[in-house]
Amino acid sequence: MNTPRKRSSLRRVLHTWSALALGITAILVGYFLFEALTSQFSNTWRSKLEAEMTSLRLTLQHQLAESDWSLADQSLSRMATRHHVEHMELIVDGYIRLSTKRSELGKEFFPELLPAGMTLQGAELQLQQDGVDFYAVLPIVIRTERLRENQRGWLIAHYNARFQYEELLHNAIHKVFILIGMLALYSLGLQHIVRKQVLNPLARLVEFTRSLRDGQLGSTIHSSTSTEFSHLEGAFNSLSRHLKHSVDQIHDQHMRDQAFTRAFPDMAFLIDNDGYIQGRYGADNSPIPELNQNLSGEYFSVWVSPEEADALEECRLKAITLHDTVISEFRHQDFYVESRLTPLLDESDSNNIRTTGVLWLIRDISEVKRKQQLIEFQANFDSLTSLANRRFALLHIDKKMAHARRAKKYGAVLFIDLDHFKNINDSLGHPVGDKILIEVGERLSKAVRDEDLTARLGGDEFLVLFDDMADTPETAAALAHDSAERLMNTIRRSYAIDIHTFHISASIGIAIFPADQLDASDLIRQADTAMYHAKSLGRNGISLYTDNMQQETQDKLNLFNDLYQAIQDKAFTLAFQPQMNDHGQITGAEALCRWTNHGVTVRPDIFIAAAEETRLILPLGSWILQESCRRLKHWRDLGLLPPSFRRLAVNISPAQFMDATFEQQVMDILNETGLSAHLLELEITESIFLGDKAIIREKMDRLAKLGIAFALDDFGTGYSSLSYLQKLPLHKLKIDRSFIMDIGDGQRPAQIVDSIIQLGQNLHMSIIAEGVESEPQRDYLQKRSCLEYQGYLYSPPLTEAEFLEYIRHNSGEHQTQDF
């Protein structure tokens, strides 16, 4: 029996041969390096000996030429100080005349003592190496004046280079180790490359083949490696996919029935060409009770109504004839059912495709249908009131407008908005508000005919559509107005919600159609415009749309747009109306804003009201305050104000005062302009006290502590309350011009003016009358100790240049201020 030979892994073979190659390379390189260094060592020392011996010979010849043997002895002895000189001597006539060993002087020299191969013959340097010992014999010619002929001698030297040789060996060993280290690093790098580029890919391929062997077909291998292995991996991947595909084809027929069962959530019937059920697939239980029975051998439509059975039979024959799936839907009791009849085709003969039966797929789509109905309801009806929404109303109105044009009939759209509904939401919460909206919708629906449309457009806005009301627009308008009155009375009835009882009014706008409207959106916009016109008249009313309303709305929109652009461009100017005392001195002025729009002067009451409505009053008021402070600081710096000038008054709107950043704005403006706070007077109106009185008082107290004065403008025309006059830091009362106009010729008393003056004096507040236009008015006020005035009697509002000229003229000579 043959025992299989044990195979070594490629990784182990590569490691063994790498180690062997590294060792042989290190030995060979070390050997050749040693040889090279040894040869270099010998050559270096031979050259060194030749140079030293030749130099010494010349020195000795020169010294002995003068018969100075003592000096020559010193020269030879100095050579002994060199650590590599072992022994050196001069032989003349067979005797040792000079020597580094003093005991040898004068002795006879025996030539046989020389190393083998060296003699006292010849005229050249003789060198011989014996390990680390070097021997040299150099002839020397001695010429002296006492000798008639030259005398010949021999310079013999013995050098020992053991120290240098050991150093050479040390360096050689060091270099060999460095070389071995470099070779080791190279070997490791080579092994890493081989492992990464060859061994690891080979291992992955081996593991991949094992996975294929274990049945993991269809898996693939991908790695970032060399091109060769990539091609090899691609071939293995193709083989794996091919094997998987082959296995899948083998099991495909077996898995078909299970695939049908998993694919369809409900069930399927196999029907023969005659329409009888031959088999069943899919779920065991169905929400449709009839399908839970055994229907094998029954006609496929036995469980549905006769009408649906006829339709299904038509679909089955159509599927067989067209060789294609026929999809249909039908209603069975409370279920919505989707039917799919798919023919089973025998395509073995392409010229004669036969139908061997029909696969009938049945799916319960009741939940899907209900969701579709819910989506359609949510798309067209309001979720809170169940009335039609804006989208449905627009579509319905478009249809009614088209019908009205064809029939030459007139109808009407009523736009209904509940008055002050926001107060209910803010005070009692949205749940209560929602209940009111639901009841309003129910009342409106009951108050109109079934064919009339009632819709909720959003928020507290409702719409009612009446069509085919009359043959003329006038008659339709009259009928629409009567209907609006009826709906208004319906809305006005009290509402009992939880423990609350409410009475609500509404504003209704009416638009007649068809007229010049283009579509439903135009008609609703006209009714909306009429509704806002009704609100502007005091709410709780009915208004019929006219073309003038649209123009007014457009003009208002243009005013808003122009006002916004003017604020961006700082297109406003300031006017200043002097405030005088009873001596005719200027005590202050009121800063007034002016605006010229497209060359037309806009009245302040118009653009200020528009700014308050759009909250543009915040940036506009900030600009007025900043510009007023800047101008006042400029006048003071130039010394243009008289000593009697105390403060400049600036009007502050309620929205501006209640803004959270107002205090910081005031302080920033004072810091930026460098104006002293005691020169600034803020005029506020009584309407500001409709807000949170605690917050108002705290804010006024903080600003008053800075030195800013407060004046109450238009006193007596608004929210008049004596309590806030005592609690708030007010410095001045300003009598409104409407009360000043009640002062006639000075003889008839004006009781309200007298009361305001008396009240201000009792509260120790300054009193100033606004709108003083005649001397009798001034005299009347002066007699009652109202000593400050503002009005056309003294000056209208002036531009800056006119105001400064007025000051100069009124003050006479220029006076230096002593603030």
Image (cartoon, rainbow, N blue to C red):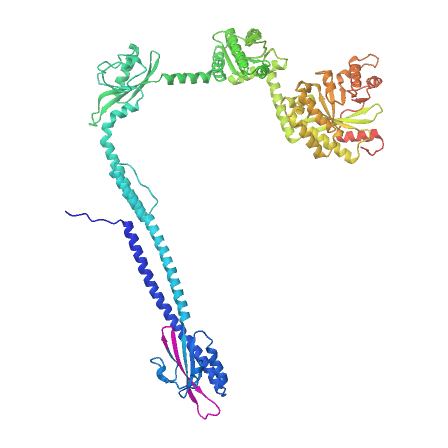
Examine the rendering and report whether any part of residue 336 can be seen: yes
Q: Position of residue 568 (x, y in %)?
A: 63, 30
Q: Nearer the viewer, residue 404 or 574?
A: 574
- In this rendering, would 703 be left or right of 818? left
353 or 535, nearer to the observer? 535
Up/down of 438 relative to 730, above or below: above
Q: Is residue 657 above or below residue 231?
A: above
Quadrant where the C terminus is found in the figure = top right
Quarter occupied by residue 140: bottom left
- Between residues 617 and 110, which one lies in front from this camera angle? 110
Q: How many marks?
A: 0
| Left or right, 99 with reference to 212 | right
The residue positioned 29% from the left and 46% from the top of the image is 202
Residue 433: percent from left, percent from top: 55, 14
Coordinates of residue 106 in the picture (x, y in percent): 43, 86
- Is the magenta region chiefly helix, strand or loop? strand
Magenta segment, which residues? 128-153
Q: Is residue 733 magenta?
A: no
Dividing the picture into quarters, in which one does residue 714 lie? top right
Quarter of the view holding residue 567:
top right
* Residue 651 seen anywhere in this rendered image of the structure: no
Please provide percent x and percent y for residue 440: 53, 10
